[in-house]
Image (cartoon, rainbow, N blue to C red):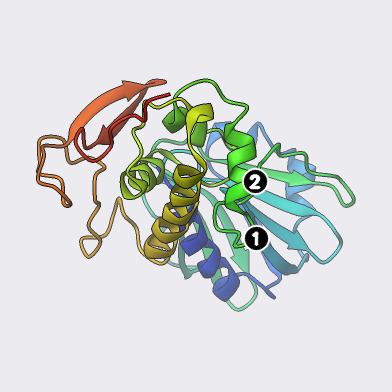
Amino acid sequence: MPELPEVEAAMQLLRRRAKGRTITKVQLLHPSLKRRVRPAALRALVGARIVRVERRGKHQLLHLDDGRIVHVHFRMNGDWEHGKSDAPLPRFARAVIDFDGGTRLALVDSRALGTLDVHPAGMELALGLGPDAADRGWTAEALGRALATRRGPVKPALLDQKLVAGLGNIYAAESLWRARISPTQRADSLSDKQVRALRSAIGAVITRATGSRYTDDDTVNLDVYDREGLPCRRCGTSIERITQAGRSTYFCPHCQVPREP
């Protein structure tokens, strides 16, 4: 699943290939996307220029020169593919945006779960997101206050986009391993020292991953995620896997021992 670093890599592509371009054609190729945008709203995109691209958590916002916003979310495995307008479409292209100059961006999504919406000018987007995981202004104190309101395990709490935007299953596990915090420890039981370690770990993991794809890049090694049965890179203990809130959680039972209340 694309997480914040993967979406940020997609944003870098949008900044290079879409910002400043004028839209000449938009096609929605999958029925689920066609149901989201009225044909008239789609046709009205022709002639609009993309003046700014913005990321909020995992949401991608393409701001048009008249105030409208094209809002894209990859969901499970979406991505952008750039190419010439007259080139064959990628196999799993679900939407295509053509630009002046004969180029295009195709929203490629093999599972067809991604979304694309068009918001009118002046509309306030209520995305319900917490602080961005990549925001350097997001402090350990703010994280601690948010966690103090959560009585459940810390790992599922970190997946709540209202608590922190952009952090997903892979990077939550990686951050907890780096901070030496058990994924099963109650979120409201973390000490100040643990919260500081966690905030630092999240920053380090996000920085390390941005520009790469942990799930798709042979040059990047995960420390704990998807390494069940393999030795911990820190202590050599076998990595274990449990299920939390329907998601796989990987951890080291030696390095990540729950803190006693």
Of 209 and 176, the residue lying toward us: 176
Q: Which mark is residue 137?
A: 1
Q: Which mark is residue 142?
A: 2
In the image, what residue occupies the spot 58% across and 37% down?
Answer: 161
Which amino acid type is shown beneath numbered disc 2? Answer: Ala
Q: Position of residue 25 (x, y in %)?
A: 66, 60
Of 121 and 25, the residue lying toward us: 121
Q: Position of residue 165 (x, y in %)?
A: 58, 45
**In the displayed structure, does residue 143 sit left or right of residue 76?**
right
Q: What element does badge 1 sit on?
A: loop
In the image, what residue occupies the spot 67% across and 34% down?
Answer: 36
Q: Quadrant of residue 149 in the image?
A: top right
Q: Is residue 162 visible?
A: no
**In the displayed structure, does residue 5 sit left or right of residue 131?**
left
Viewer-nearest of discs 2 and 1: 2
Which amino acid type is shown beneath numbered disc 1? Answer: Gly
Q: Residue furthest right?
A: 122
Ranked by sequence position, the earlier of labels 2 and 1 is 1
Q: Quadrant of residue 103 in the image?
A: bottom right
**In the displayed structure, does residue 78 sit left or right of residue 34?**
left
Q: Position of residue 42 (x, y in %)?
A: 73, 48
Q: What element does badge 2 sit on?
A: helix
Which quadrant of the rendered structure holds the N terminus? Answer: top left
Q: How many marks?
A: 2
